[in-house]
Image (cartoon, rainbow, N blue to C red):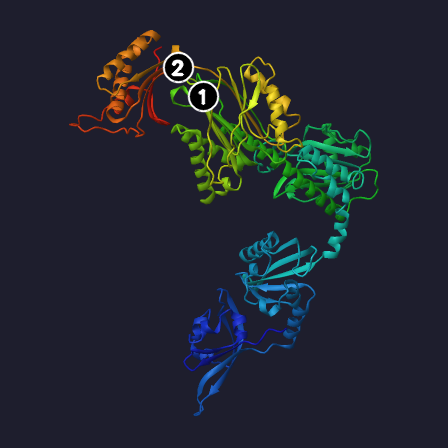
Amino acid sequence: MEQAAAAAIVDARGTLTGWSEGARRLTGYTAEEVVGRAVQELLAEDVPLPGLTALTGTVVLRHRDGHPLPLRLSVHPVMGADGSPQGFVVTTAPATADAVLVARAFQQAPVAMSVFDLGQRYIRANDRAGEILQVDADTLTGRYLPDTVADDESGRRLHRQLRRVAETGLPVHYESYTRAPSERREHAWTIDMWPVCCAPGEMTAVAMSAVDNSEQYWARRRLVLLNEASTVIGTTLDVPRTAGELLEVVVPGVADFASVDLLDWVLGAEEPPVLAEGDVALRRIAHRSVTEGTPEAAVQLGDVDTYSPFSPPARALREGRAVLRRVGEPDFDRWVQERNARGVGDAAYRRGAHSLVAVPLRARGTTLGVAVLVRIVNPDPYAADDAVLAEELASRAAVCVDNARRFARERGTALALQHSLLPRGLPGQAAVEVAHRYLPSGSLAGIGGDWFDVIPLSGSRVALVVGDVVGHGIRSSATMGRLRTAVRTLADVDLPPDELLTHLDDLVTHLATGEGGDEVGELGATCLYAVYDPVTRRLALAAAGHPAPAVLAPDGTARLVTMSAGPPLGVGGLPFEARELDLEEGSLIALYTDGLIGEGRERDLDHGTTELCRALETPSGSLDALCDTVLKSVLSEEPGDDVALLLARTRALGADRVGTWDVPPDPASVATARQYAVDRLADWGLDEAGFVTELVVSELVTNAIRYGGPPIQLRLIRDRSLICEVSDGSSTSPHLRRAHAYDEGGRGLLLVAQLTQRWGSRQTSEGKTIWAEQPLPD
């Protein structure tokens, strides 16, 4: 359709009183924006009012987006009753016959054509552009380009290129492959954009044409979409194998000899470097020939070769497109001669190679390497369609190579993160002897969130922890690190296993419902927490959706601990049940994750735990050796999930290392308690620690008598440190405070804290225990 006429009404004072739809489309202003304004406000230059009332003339308006808009106008006066002009009707000057013909040719062209202002808003679009966008072309006027195209890479690129022309004034030509809204299949578009200037150097608009080359594109596509290419390339996440699969497709169908060379960083963990000028070093990763043994290759697999800047592989890398060369072309002949002079010339060119296509392996905007296809036996030289075919095949292979590279890198990153979050050296303590193993998943899913820990507690006790975050990858590893830190923090409070899991469950629930909580809430997690006391030889444990541990008795029989697994972390609503059992000295506790006992394999969990118990009963010289025996016996293949195994052999602190005395609730008993402590230290040969121990015992026993309740008990433990514990029947926890100058009390715990390495309190079933540790004398 032809552009609607633009008209405006101006009164005798130069104020706009009327504004047509055509004027809105032409200038971008709506009637509401201009009616009532002085006409001079719309002009790009100062023109006196008499000049505006001339019958015809050319003026420059300021478009709504700011660019100048030259127009030839016709002015028609509106006479009043006295014959004087009361106002004017201003219209665009009538178009000439040639102008009408040009407008109709634009509107009816079979090529999609559009004109945009410098703000990327439609000034005019022809009928074909409207058909492609499935709208009336007239309705596009004034609309912003991104609002009319799909929000995908093709649409965003179209906008980027249009903005680039508007900003630089340089024309753009490129190919775009996308789908029209009315079509199901892909279209190939040749898009040109160029500046429109009203005067030299004065750009006022940007024009664009889009030519549909779909038929030619689909003709080439039929060659590309070979069944072999879609099924062979990318069957594994292995870089050399993927390169070999590409060559299996092109040889012998497309090439007689082909090779794939990659930049060295692709096979490592570094970031892609900027491709520098000069020679390019590439590593041969795969080659293939129609002749058995690949006699054409002078570069062996794994070797690095250097390519001159003018060589087809180097040009393909730098230009990011396929480079086609034939015998007789200067660059091709020069390159072959240069390689022969260096003694690395491929025998393919001595055997009659007459043309080649070097195509870059590019994926996600990153150049990985180059594939070279050579024809020797096939007499037809490569043509442009062959280059397109090679680019498509190389593009498929490049994505697969990049996937394999990214997988290897992410796996390495996740594994490094996993190992950094797991304990590197388990702390020394007297309660248990430990050994552990961690095996990452061998599946494509990546590293999981399995973890374990050994945490020393007060009173020579030790906490054994094992957990599993469902899922794989860096997210799971990061979540595992958060949970492990949370468990260590809660363990420092010295909570019983069931209470600790309750607090951990609350934390996971909070994370799942708070900001960023999907890291834990969507993944899910399980945990087993156990506490072993070497004095009482008692093991207390609770589980949150985790498999029960196995215990190997000193007589060589293994069994699973009967316990309630409880719900996984984050489920909430159900309590966790604690289980306690007495262990003989020398018992072995095996904690593990479900990846060990058969998750993802055909056998069930009961069968896996039976194999675990049988493996634990196998005689072994050390715990480390037993770890290896368990893994070899229970895991018959590469694990499909992460595996964490923690073995702990229990020890016991006998009467010769523990001293216990029941303290009567009488202040006079404080002196007796001090003497008992001094005598016990003398028996242990620790007389040097007597002074500090007397003070600690005096303060703790006094506090228990004064503020606690019976029964009161004093216990001394000689372990890697000297531990003093005072228990009483009150659950009130002590608080450290600084006494004022004239206070009679309040300095006891402060004194204990200053004299010992660390101190604390823990709740017991009968009340509480206050403890303090001090180092043993050298």
Of mark 2 and mark 1, the one earlier in the sequence is 1
The disc labelled 1 sits on which kind of residue? Arg
365 and 693: which is toward the camera? 693
Element assignment for label 2: loop
Say above or below: 732 vs 755. Answer: below
Q: Quadrant of residue 462?
A: top left
Q: Is residue 75 visible?
A: yes
Label 1 SS: strand
Tell me how many marks there are: 2
Mark 1, Cα crowd under 10 Å, few <14 / some 14-19 / many 20+, is some
Residue 473 screen position, x and y as percent: 56, 36
Quadrant in which the C terminus is drawn: top left
Q: Amino acid at mark 2?
A: Asp
| 319 w.r.t. 30: above or below | above
Residue 692 at what x, y percent from top left?
Answer: 28, 15
Residue 3 coordinates in the image, percent (x, y): 60, 73
Q: Which mark is residue 719?
A: 2
Q: Which is nearer the eye, 215 or 162?
A: 215
- Indicate the quadrant where residue 548 lies: top right
Residue 529's disc number: none
What residue would you read off at disc 1? 538
In the image shown, does 368 or 504 lie closer to the viewer?
504
Give the alpha-carbon distance from disc 2 to disc 1, as whole Å: 17 Å
